[in-house]
């Protein structure tokens, strides 16, 4: 079985042959949102832009990102774990996240890279916690074990009307192809997820930024880029940016 279905998610080095620089301390950014919000497109565009500016960027995703987590991804998205209930799924997402954090994310942040991750802990809070109906105390305990202190520095929540998001997601995969385990749920569930992401953003304004993802991709890219570079400037003063090239 190919545990690296999309090699770029595991790419640690700058593909353009430039000499990237590393920050004195890395920066961990997560992208969140419902189906069809355009996270994958935007995260790839941001990675390209940052690499062009010589940032050392690691692009990754959940569930997955490390070989162990990619193996669990298949079990989760195929629906193989669905009959065993949302608690079982939450535990599997947490197991995958723990492996991903320890094998890939933490080492990258510690060596000074910018880590861009397509979905992370907020997806578990929303999909398993809120719409899976799992006890919040259980979810909180699981989250702490899974991330082991590796909280994102910044989370971009791409917000879109779920009807439009699902339309885009169907178009992307092709109407004949089957929706995955989570995408196939009812519009009411997707609406509840949207509300839950917005509630997280409201509760944690220091970490989360909500971005209107209904605009065209270039406009969304502009907003994403501005937000990320502003945060990096604020976090990494000029002297950090002079860190030795790698
Ligand atoms: P994926 O195919 O990666 O696509 P996208 O992010 O574009 O939707 O699907 C991942 C699915 O897994 C998605 O429906 C959300 C779900 N998910 C959870 O339910 N909990 C989680 O903790 C994570 C990371 C994802």
Image: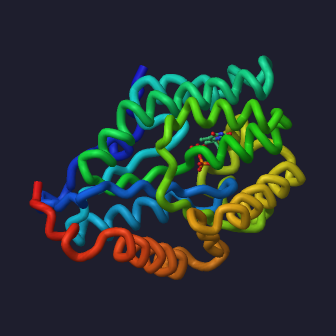
Q: Residue at x 74, y 63 (%)?
A: 198
Tally the marks.
0
What residue is shown at x 44% (from left), y 36% (from top)? 101
* Closer to us: 235 or 81: 235
Residue at the right extreme, as displayed? 188
Task: Estimate the x, y position of residue 193 in percent, counting from the top left.
Answer: 78, 53
Tell me where residue 156 sits by quadrant: bottom right
Quarter of the rendered image showing ligand 1? top right
Colouring of the image:
rainbow
Which of the two residues, 167 or 175, is positioned nearer the viewer here?
A: 167
Picture quarter with the C terminus: bottom left
- Say which residue appears at 49% left-offset and 79% top-offset: 218
Horizontal arrangement in the rendering, residue 42 relative to residue 172 (left or right): left
Q: Is residue 127 above or below residue 76?
A: below
- Is 145 left or right of 8, judged from the image as shown? right
Q: Nearer the viewer, residue 81 or 237?
A: 237
Residue at 24% from the left image edge and 60% from the top image edge:
23
Instruction: Specify the quadrant that holds the N terminus.
Output: top left
Residue 37 is situated, as x and y percent measured from the top left of the image, at 63, 62
Locate residue 185: give its quadrant: top right
* Residue 232 rendering spot, x and y as whole percentages: 37, 70
């Amino acid at each position: 079985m190919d545990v690296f279905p999309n090699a770029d998610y595991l790419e640690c080095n700058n593909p353009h042959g430039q000499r990237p620089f590393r920050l004195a301390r890395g920066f961990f950014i997560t992208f969140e949102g419902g189906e069809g919000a355009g996270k994958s497109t935007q995260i790839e565009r941001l990675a390209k832009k940052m690499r062009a500016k010589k940032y050392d960027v690691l692009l990754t995703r959940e569930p997955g990102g490390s070989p162990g987590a990619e193996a669990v991804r298949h079990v989760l998205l195929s629906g193989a774990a669905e009959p065993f209930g949302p608690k079982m799924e939450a535990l599997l997402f947490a197991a995958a996240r723990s492996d991903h954090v320890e094998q890939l994310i933490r080492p990258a942040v510690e060596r000074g890279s910018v880590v861009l991750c397509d979905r992370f802990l907020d997806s578990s809070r929303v999909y398993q916690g809120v719409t899976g109906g799992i006890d919040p105390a259980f979810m909180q305990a699981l989250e702490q074990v899974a991330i082991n202190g590796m909280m994102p520095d910044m989370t971009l929540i791409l917000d879109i009307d779920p009807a439009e998001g699902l339309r885009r997601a169907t178009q992307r995969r092709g109407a004949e192809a089957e929706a995955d385990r989570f995408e196939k749920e009812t519009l009411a569930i997707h609406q509840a997820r949207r509300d839950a992401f917005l509630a997280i953003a409201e509760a944690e304004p220091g970490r989360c930024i909500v971005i209107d993802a209904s605009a065209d991709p270039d406009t969304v890219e502009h907003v994403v880029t501005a937000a990320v570079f502003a945060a990096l400037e604020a976090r990494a003063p000029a002297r950090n940016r002079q860190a030795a090239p790698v």
